[in-house]
Every structure is written in structure tokens, then in C-alpha cells.
Amino acid sequence: MRLANRAFLDGRRELAHPIVSGRGGLEVAESLRVLTDRWIVALWQQAIPAQMSDGISLFATGGYGRRELALHSDVDLLVAVHDDDLANDERFELAIERLMAWSRQTRVSLSHAVRTAEQTRHAIVEDRRTPIALLDSRHLSGPKTEGDVFDVDFIVDHLRGDDQGITFVAGLVEGLRHRAARHGKTVFLLEPDLKNGEGGLRDINYIAWAARVRWRLDVRRDIDEQRGWSESHREDYRQGLDALLSMRNRLHLLRERKQDRLTFREQEALARLIEYGPVSDVDQALAAVDQARKAAEAQATTKDEALHDAIEDAMGRHYRRARKVATTCERVLRHWCTEKDSAPTRHGPFE
């Protein structure tokens, strides 16, 4: 357990180098996914008694399941219990407590849900968030069953319902409206939210969920010209996601915790970090982060015109990307929740 935790923390520290160096957000997310998978599975195998392993499966959900982790993102897990007798077994409960206790030693925000198949069937009917969380699930350990309630294809079929997903996508459109009411119906907020704001990561997620349910498309991998999803659309989608994850990783690195709002202080620190230039190793990267953070906290830049221009440039790039993502999300969702199952709109996604 100690070795697994130490390897995980050392690996996360090493990621400061590619993050500060401006490596793509998707590339860093994949490195973090590999590192986190290795850590979680190692703890899991030590925590769960061997005689129980055939009756329990472990899944990654949320951003972890989507392979879109940032440095201090929450790590969400689903423990699927295939043998109902295990659900009330004290040894099983102790094993889960042991897993959570070990993970807390790394100060990672790890959350979990433990469900039997019957409990999951009930949850996907009672709480709309549950099937969406399962839509992003990714198998980590234990039996990998097909066609049951823990199978992503089962969840897709459930969300498609009797109208091939039209109602589901219409619900996402309604979700856009409510989220805009809470977070502001504009991408040009002075302190934008990288996750829930207009043109943020949640808009990216909506596009992926809609495509998966409505057309069974993986928008990061698949192309379907008939549905209005071309190679150029896929590439623009990936670039938007890559840029948002890259900025989010730098923000997490600067704040040393999960944070999605770009306050004025964080904007200044990010601009300083971007202007710092290439770094040669992790120690230099961490020194650059510390320097940028302290300078921003000291508010020593009121007359620094060069830095002011750098902030304006960085935020300008963010607003342009966010506007493109927001426009695309609304256009795609409104098109995909119609009765039409072909004939792309005149202006396709990201155009």
C-alpha cells in the first residue's frame, strides 16, 4: 500500500514538467489516467480478499471514466456487487473502508458508490444522474459482464428509450438552459468557470453524451458524415477539449487543489506561467509555479504593461475557444433532438 501511494504521488509530481511546458491536456490526462489506474488497482487488490474478487467489479466513472482527469480532479469509483450476499458481508465492508483509508493518505478526493445490480436498476430510474455517470464508466478490475445493468451498452439502450435518444438529448438542451441561468449566459465572464461556464468542459461532455446515446458515436474516435460529424469536426472537438484540460491542469497546479474558476489572481498567475518559457525538468517546473503564484498573490503587477498584454492574450484565446464550444454544443444538441436522423445542418459543428 505504501509503495503504491508513493509511486502515485511521485508520478503526479513528475507531471508538473509537461503541464508547465505546455504539453497537451489530453496527453497529460492520459498519463494521469494510466498512473491513477495503476494506483487504484494496486490498492484494490490489496484491500479485497481474494475469495471475494469474483463477485465484485470496480469501475471508473465521471471524468476519471472519460479519461479526462486533471491534476486534482475527484476520482470517482463504482463498486459493482454481483453476489448480493457480499453486500452485507462485514469483511466486504471492512475491505471498502480499508481502500478509502489508504487512498486518503495521498490527499486525493476519492469517492465511491457500492451497488448491487438491483440497486443500480432502481437508481437509474430514480436519479437521472446515475445512468449518465454509468455512461462514462470504464472497467478497472473484477468480472467484466456483458448485457447487464453495469454494461455501458445497456445504459445507452436505456437512455435511448423508445425514441432513439431524442428525449434524452432534449433533456440536455434543458440542462444547458438551467446551467446558463446559474453560471451566466455568456462566455465573456470576467472570471470564467472552466467546467460549468458557457463553453466549458460540461458543454464538451454534453456533446459526447448526446452523440453516444443518439447515434452510438464516440466523438473523440468516430466519424459519421451523415450525422454531421466529420473528421474536421472531430479534430476541432479534440482541440477544444485539449485546450480546456491544459488550462485546468495549470490552474490546479497553481492552486495545489481542485479549482475551476479563473479569478483575476489566477489569470495573472497563468499568464506569468505561460510567459515563463520552457522548463528542463520537474524541479524547474515547480519553481516556475511557485514564482508565478507568489507574484500574483503579492499583486506586484499593477503597472506591468507587458504582463497585462499577456493576460489579455491568454484570456482572448480562451474566450474564442469557449464561444466556439458553446455555439457548437447548442447547435448540435438542438439538431440531434429533432426527428431527423440524417441530413446535417447547413452549418455543422465547429463551423
Image: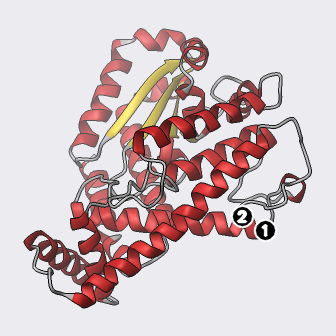
Residue 59, image x, y percentages: 52, 37
Within-10-Å neighbours for mark 2: few <14, some 14–19, many 20+? many
* Residue 341 visible in this rendered orientation of the protein: yes
Label 1 residue SS: helix
Count of numbered badges drawn on the protein: 2
Foreground residue, 227 or 122? 227
Q: Residue at x 56, y 35 (%)?
A: 175
Using residue 1 as the reference point, say whether residue 175 is left or right of it.
right
Q: Amino acid type of disc 2? A: Arg
Q: Amino acid type of disc 1? A: Glu
Q: Residue at x 79, y 62 (%)?
A: 347
Q: Residue at x 46, y 69 (%)?
A: 318
Q: Is residue 279 above or below residue 191?
A: below
Using residue 54 as the reference point, say whether residue 148 is left or right of it.
right
Q: Tell me, yes or no, whether the two marked residues, 1 and 2, touch with CB atoms within 8 Å.
A: yes
Using residue 345 as the reference point, say whether residue 169 is left or right of it.
left
Query: Which residue position is annotated with label 2?
Result: 234
